Amino acid sequence: MSELLGLFNEVAPLEPITDLVDILAWITNGKSREIKFKLFDDVSMVYELQLAKMEFSRWSENLDSFRCRTAYFEEVAGEKSWHFYLSSIVGKGQIGHSNQYLTHWFYPYKGKFHGQMIKALLNFMAVTEQSTVLDPFVGSGTTIVECATIGVLSVGVEINPALCFVSLVKHQALSIDFPKFRQVLHRLPLSKIFQRFTQQLEKPKPLELPSMPFDGESLSQAIWEQIFPDIVNDLPFEYRNLLLLVFLHALSDYTYLKDTGKARPLEVFWQENLTEYFRTIEGVHRVREMLSINFAPARIFCADALTLPLPGNSVEGIVTSPPYSIALDYVRNDEHLLKYFGLNADSLRRRMIGLKGQGKQRLVMYEQDMRQSLLEMVRVLKPYGWVAIILGDVVVGEQRTDFCQRILQWAPELGFDQAIALRRPILGGYARLRFEYILLLRKGGNEDGAKC
Ligand SMILES: C[S@@+](CC[C@H](N)C(=O)[O-])C[C@H]1O[C@@H](n2cnc3c(N)ncnc32)[C@H](O)[C@@H]1O
């Protein structure tokens, strides 16, 4: 101790430091010296500061709109932002203001991206109520939920029907009128509904689906007509779908925790999740009323990103995260869902990007598919529209794949005329993934897009 004190005694007297970088002034181009802005306290990573600057640059002339849209600012011109209120609807596993708020936490899908980051990218693209945004690999629906909060129409495409259902319900749940829903709930035989959902688990009745593409509404109708024609058939689809999603969430918790110290009966997870889901629906309703938000509609398609079910030049922006090469087996992760609906996991696997082929052939096929999916994105994007691609660098065997670099190399010949790349470190978690890259590519003025 006395040695330490000795060290301190040797420190030179402190001089005030005057030339530190004023980050907020850098982000706001000096505006923060006259107008009060505040970033959320947990905005600290370099890519977050970059995105905060990028979103601000597009909306700095319209601070009222910016307050409703911003992802990284807690206060704009001295008033709390909408994101402050939206992210206060706390969900399971939420970290700060970045993820799991609103309905984002519904269903524990592994590999979903952070809503806050997606909102900032949409802001950078300057998409408005007149725009449509596409996510061709929508997974569990993060993009369509974020689009809804800023009034932007969206289209989500996903090859896995079970995930189409998850996306559909997470978006539908945003607009549920909680007081009406609560009245219905009082008369619902919840334990009977649980038993009926459990019967499907024990003896799955296979879902027969039309050939792709088909939309989310047709999917939900097929589920209720074919599998559960006998229960809650007087309820609106969004209520029934929500109940089924609670069950699927419970099923996932049960499946993943069954051999751990946290294992519990399925019914306990169901009851716990029911309470938590209803709390979220109530919170969303309250904030929606307080801010008078109209969440924008979304369309979901169960379809292949390699042949998008959309006409050319039909969307203003694309935000997406394609499968990360062979980093994650997206089928295995949610196999319990496929089984539940009696869907064939192997035939899905044969159509999924990143899972086709064996050994070295798999990477070759991945590269071909990535290129084809980019060609499709260019086709459906309007000239001067932006694509944001979030992709990780992954080790396959001994080799670190660098598909982000490859995409940047392809960009000019695919018809893009501008590119921006940001890097986001992945802390802890998946050791084979060190960084995620956010690639922003702008389609040039040529309507036909690709030059190849
Ligand atoms: C990285 S995940 C997307 C996660 C999403 N961003 C979210 O927040 O939930 C990639 C998704 O691409 C889907 N996918 C794989 N091949 C596909 C294809 N050919 N067409 C459409 N979707 C596909 C997978 O099922 C997976 O859900």
Image (tube, rainbow, N blue to C red):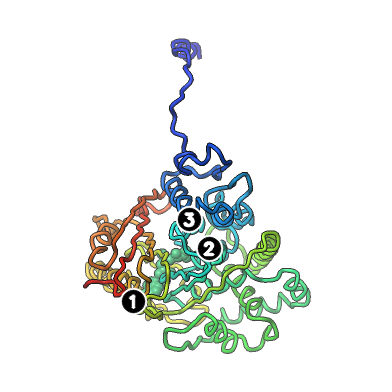
The residue to which callout 1 is attached is 306
**Residue 152 image offset from top left, x and y in percent:** 52, 67
Query: Pointer 3: what residue?
Result: 120
* SS for dot 1: loop
3 or 1: mark nearer the eye: 3
**Amino acid type assigned to the residue bearing label 2 in the image:** Glu
Judging by the rendered image, the residue that carries numbered circle 2 is 146
- What element does badge 2 sit on? helix
Amino acid on which the number 1 mark rests in the picture: Leu
Residue located at (44% from left, 10% from top): 10
Give yes or no for contact between labels 3 and 1 (Cβ–Cβ under 8 Å): no
Mark 2 vs mark 1, foreground winner is 2
- Please state if 409 lies on the left or on the right of 293 as rendered: left
Measuring 60% from the left and 61% from the top, which residue is drawn there?
Answer: 102
Question: Residue 154, which numbered label?
Answer: none
Relative horizontal placement of residue 395, taking residue 234 as reference (left or right):
left
In the image, the residue with mark 1 has its CB under 8 Å from the nearest atom of ligand 1: yes
Q: Position of residue 88 (x, y in %)?
A: 63, 53
Quadrant in which residue 169 is drawn: bottom right
Which of these two is toward me, 378 or 262? 378
Q: Marks 2 and 1, Cα distance to the nearest angstrom?
A: 24 Å
**Crowd class of label 3 (few under 14; some 14 to 19; many from 20; radius 10 Å):** many
Residue 399 lies in what quarter of the image? bottom left
Give the amino acid type for the residue marked by disc 3 in the picture. Answer: Ala
Sequence-wise, the earlier of marks 3 and 2 is 3
- Marks 3 and 1, how far apart at CA: 27 Å
Q: CA distance from mark 3 to mark 2?
A: 10 Å
Q: Quadrant of ligand 1?
A: bottom left
